[in-house]
Amino acid sequence: MNLNAEDFQAIALTLQLASVTTVLLLLLATPVAWWLAHTCSNWRAPVASLVALPLVLPPTVLGFYLLVALGPNGPIGQFTQWAGWGTLAFSFWGLVLGSVVYSLPFAVQPLVHAFEAMGPRPMEVAVTLRASKWDAFFTVAVPLAKPGFVMAAMLSFAHTVGEFGVVLMIGGNIPDKTRVVSTQIYGHVEAMEYSQAHGLAGVMLVFSFVVLLGLSWFSRRQKVSA
Amino acid sequence: MVWKMRLFLALVGAFFFASAQAGEVTVAVAANFTAPMQKIAKAFELETGHKAHLAFGATGKFYAQIKNAAPFAVLLAADDETPAKLEKEAFSVVGTRFTYATGRLALWSRQPNLVDDKGEVLRSNRFDQLGIHKIAIADPKLAPYGAAAMEVIQRMGVQSSVSPKLVQGESIGQTYQFVSTENAQLGFVALSQISVDGRITQGSAWVVPQSMHTPLKQDAVLLNAGKDNAAARALLKYLQSNTAKAIIQSYGYAL
């Protein structure tokens, strides 16, 4: 396979981006999913729809408005400048922010399902045994919802690796900083370097297949043991 | 009564004659040429009765599509290399290539007075004090405008101070977005993107002299799919007419 140094840089950066995004997404998606799974509020439907929006919106639309929002006159840009971080477009953390938004539904949905499948009973029992709410959450709910967490993590990671439109829009294609595998492949294709594109695309294909294979094995094992 | 009948017959005859002559042509158009081409296609339809269907996109993508039997009759490329390559690989009709427009490069900022008319702002070593954190160019590997911008930067001898500030758009269209949303305070864009009727519409700009970079020739070519298409040949001829030339120039292209 004819991968060059820049291709390997792109692979490393992609893995780094996907890891950071996945960790942040799990932290963010857990309370959101918990609330969605338990609330009777009128806000449930609007919030659930808002979370699912990135599934429907074209990535270039999402990317363009993120670019506007991150800019010096956009709301996020105003905040980050006020906080003394400058503007986030064209930086690693800008990509992280974009990826978190883009992959949010892939983290939230499996967790909502897992929390709903658990039912109210285990938490009620834990509370009657005098566990505090937090204690019950970490010792009862989290272990019971483990398949949901695994699913959410794998989907978020894979989806971030496959991200293209958003990264292209807010990344600026800077080697070693914002040039990920998908944009690198795009660059090879546009520059008519088809053989290099094939090599990198092959790596991506194998990776994605393995992740999906793992997912379906995992969910099958869950069903058998349940 | 008789003259009315004759007029009617003449009109009917003219209609049938026109519809027998009117053809259709599907054209792949470089994204940077979108606005002028829409205008030219309208004028072309009015004058010849032929209908031009326009598809806009990146030249590299069109190249891949044409090699895989895309039904385009004509390509208006963003460079002169792709049409030459297509001809060499026998995907186009030999002897139909010509330069329909020459792009002009501009250093542009949304801020008034930031860019002077000689581009001296690039020589200043005080980018941070001037509030310039990012300078956008199109990817030099993919876009001729990006390669031209790099030539200008090198010719001015400012690589060392400019390079750390550079961000790359995948196309000149995206580069324009970076600067117009002020995520990049400065950028090399196409003059056609920022000027209307020879005037810069907003911010400040330096129109880079053509002597500072390889000419941004944009070539047109008749593709194999359009070989026997009269409308395709008519369109290529129309692009060299005075009406089309006037439209092309009004959008900031040289000829």
Image (cartoon, rainbow, N blue to C red):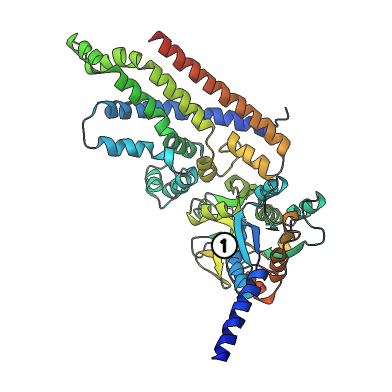
Question: For the C terminus of chain B, which image quadrant?
Answer: bottom right
B112 over B31 or under it: above or below: below
B41 over A223 or under it: above or below: below
Q: Residues within 10 Å of mark 1 (few under 14, many from 20)?
A: many
- Image position of B197 (left or right of B23): left
- Image position of B85 (left or right of B64): right
Question: Front-most of B211 and B2?
Answer: B2
- Image position of B225 (left or right of A26): right
The residue identified by callout 1 is: B193
* Residue positioned 30% across, 37% down in the render: A47
* Residue positioned 74% across, 52% down in the render: B82
Q: Position of residue A5 (x, y in %)?
A: 68, 31
Output the chain of dot 1. Answer: B
Q: Position of residue A24 (x, y in %)?
A: 41, 28
**Residue A192's quadrant in the figure?**
top right
* Residue furthest front as drawn: B2
- Amino acid type of the residue tagged 1 in the rendering: Gln
Q: Is residue B214 visible?
A: no
